Image (tube, rainbow, N blue to C red):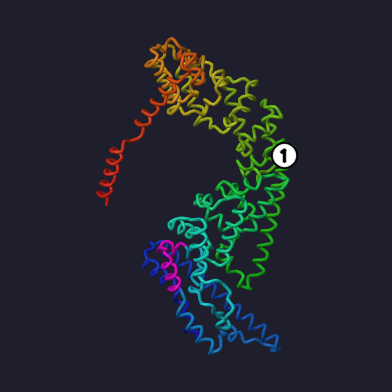
């Protein structure tokens, strides 16, 4: 029997497994990694069961009153002769070859199979078929099923949940299997079904779940109980998020850090934790780990409730659910981090009642480094922006706080000085967002065009800084070309302010002098925009030439 057991164990040899995977198309590196994972899992599993048999034999001997234990006999315990034959027959139709056959028969590639065995090596020892009889290697064949077969979990997770329920394409469904640990285990497949059912009850459609392909594997591997608890917290008086908001909030990739905080990954891998219940040897360790995890999660919820209370009561944020939806990590911040930011916003001139509005408008501000905020403000002061203007600037444009002084703000200031702007502080006060504009993509092209159509470009820009905020092609060029081509009005006779500050209809009537209510200008703008779109988009013939050229280059490389 020991020889038969050794023969069965040898099929999980790393080299043997890797060779089988390479034979079905898996690459060398992942085949070797999968082989090592399977071998280590099989050895650990065999050792655990040997220890379990020894402990059961010892307990049985002590219960019968035997004072001594024959350790050698206990550790080499084997089933009865009639059971060994049944076990051998069972293993002839199972094992790693049968598992690989089942997976490839389902349409999985060598890469898919290797990836699954890397993150969930326990799949290699599952029952492959759908027979009702399972084998308990300690006591022989048994009619009581301890776990689902691989065929069943494939049907539940791959063909059922991923393909039919979420309607993923076969390629995308296989990709989820490759990156979602434990999905082909009994517990993992059922938990994934519960997750989808829960999110569906929160208003999340199957199609919206399927669109989040990058975050879907992580979402399906989470604990349904943990997600339900978070949904309850978000709908409570602390946050007051609506049910529909909760569903879309939980499925978004941006919520992953919050989900990790309330559903922390254990030190064991997912596939190991699914198998841990069959190992009495580690029950105490797992129990301690679960207790510690519950304590950490409980502490996290208390921290989140405290932060929600501070934002609502002390800071005055009324739309807390909207703020959290825009920036889920807000709940994980320390109160000692956010209050100094609130105080600093008040110090630079933002009214106390406006601070919560600023935070709701730009939630990323609560995560900012106070030192960086001070650096931005001090730089603007050095440019000549008056303290009295700072509050209004940052209340209206809080995103300026996130600009990098060296990489974004300094190049803009250099450009403005280069075109002759002397009072930089006043210019910025009149157009604060200019500090975040791209010099090469926004400022320079607009300045060069204005220099072509206007004789007093510098004076016009200083008098009307908002010129740089208008779209170049859709607004600036369209209006100047209408005056020149349709109305024959020289651009030098009309100020930049008059050309741009009105809406389309008012521009046509008040500046261009149209008497048709602006219809002629609207038609002109539509035709011009169509011509502009055609110029930007490559023609069908050019696209075909480009495709042919790419194909020929590819053929040459091959």
Closest to the observer, 268 or 87: 87
Q: Which residue is mark 1?
A: 312
Count residues near mark 1 (Cα–Cα under 10 Å), then give few for <14, some for 14-19, many for 20+. Answer: some
283 with respect to 522 (left or right): right
Q: Nearer the viewer, residue 292 or 176?
A: 176
Q: Residue furthest right?
A: 313
Relative to 178, does residue 521 appear above or below in the rendering?
above
Q: Nearer the viewer, residue 389 or 130?
A: 130
Name the spot of residue 459 as percent of width and height, x first.
48, 12
Quadrant hosting residue 324:
top right
The answer to which quarter of the image holds residue 58 is: bottom right
Q: Is residue 304 magenta?
A: no
Q: Which residues are magenta?
A: 96-115
Q: Secondary structure at mark 1?
A: helix
Judge whether 14 appears above or below 86 on screen: above
Residue occupying image coordinates x 27% and y 40%: 545
User: Percent x, y for residue 447?
Assistant: 43, 20
Residue 140 vs residue 94: left or right?
right
Determine the main secondary structure of the stretch shown in magenta.
helix
């Amino acid at each position: 029997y020991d020889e038969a057991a050794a023969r069965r164990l040898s099929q999980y040899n790393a080299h043997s497994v890797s060779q089988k995977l390479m034979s079905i198309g898996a690459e060398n590196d992942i085949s070797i990694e999968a082989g090592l994972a399977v071998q280590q899992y099989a050895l650990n599993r065999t050792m655990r069961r040997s220890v379990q048999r020894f402990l059961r034999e010892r307990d049985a001997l002590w219960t019968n009153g035997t004072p001594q234990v024959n350790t050698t006999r206990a550790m080499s315990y084997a089933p009865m002769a009639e059971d060994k034959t049944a076990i051998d027959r069972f293993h002839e139709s199972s094992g790693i070859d049968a598992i690989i056959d089942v997976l490839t028969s389902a349409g999985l590639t060598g890469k898919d199979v290797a990836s699954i065995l890397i993150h969930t090596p326990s799949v290699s020892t599952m029952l492959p078929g759908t027979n009702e009889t399972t084998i308990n290697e300690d006591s022989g064949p048994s009619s009581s099923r301890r776990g689902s077969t691989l065929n069943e979990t494939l049907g539940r997770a791959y063909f059922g949940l991923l393909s039919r329920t979420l309607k993923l394409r076969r390629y995308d469904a296989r990709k989820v299997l490759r990156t979602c640990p434990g999905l082909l285990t009994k517990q993992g497949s059922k938990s994934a079904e519960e997750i989808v059912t829960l999110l569906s009850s929160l208003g999340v459609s199957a199609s919206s779940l399927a669109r989040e392909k990058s975050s879907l594997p992580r979402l399906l591997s989470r604990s349904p109980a943990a997600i339900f608890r978070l949904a309850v917290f978000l709908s409570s008086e602390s946050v007051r998020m609506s049910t529909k908001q909760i569903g879309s909030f939980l499925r978004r990739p941006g919520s992953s850090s919050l989900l990790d905080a309330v559903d922390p990954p254990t030190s064991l891998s997912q596939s190991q934790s699914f198998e841990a219940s069959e190992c009495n040897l580690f029950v105490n360790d797992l129990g301690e780990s679960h207790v510690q995890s519950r304590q950490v999660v409980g502490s996290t919820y208390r921290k989140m409730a405290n932060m929600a209370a501070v934002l609502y009561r002390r800071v005055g944020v009324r739309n807390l659910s909207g703020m959290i939806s825009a920036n889920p990590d807000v709940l994980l911040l320390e109160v000692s981090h956010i209050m100094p930011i609130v105080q600093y916003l008040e110090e630079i001139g933002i009214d106390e009642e406006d601070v919560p509005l600023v935070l709701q408008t730009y939630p990323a501000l609560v995560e900012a480094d106070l030192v960086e905020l001070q650096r931005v403000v001090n730089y603007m002061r050095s440019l000549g922006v008056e303290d009295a203007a700072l509050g209004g600037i940052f209340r209206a444009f809080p995103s300026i706080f996130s600009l990098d002084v060296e990489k974004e703000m300094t190049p803009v200031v250099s450009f403005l000085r280069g075109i002759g702007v002397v009072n930089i502080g006043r210019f910025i006060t009149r157009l604060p967002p200019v500090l975040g504009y791209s010099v090469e993509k926004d400022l320079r092209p607009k300045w060069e065009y204005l220099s072509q159509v206007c004789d007093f470009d510098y004076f016009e820009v200083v008098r009307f800084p908002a010129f740089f905020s208008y779209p170049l092609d859709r607004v600036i060029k369209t209006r100047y070309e209408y005056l020149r081509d349709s109305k024959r009005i020289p651009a030098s006779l009309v100020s930049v302010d008059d050309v741009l500050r009105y809406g389309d209809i008012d521009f046509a009537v008040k500046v261009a002098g149209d008497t048709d209510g602006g219809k002629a200008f609207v038609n002109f703008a539509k035709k011009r925009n169509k011509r502009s779109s055609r110029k930007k988009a490559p023609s069908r013939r050019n696209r075909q030439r480009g495709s042919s050229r790419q194909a020929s280059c590819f053929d040459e490389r091959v």
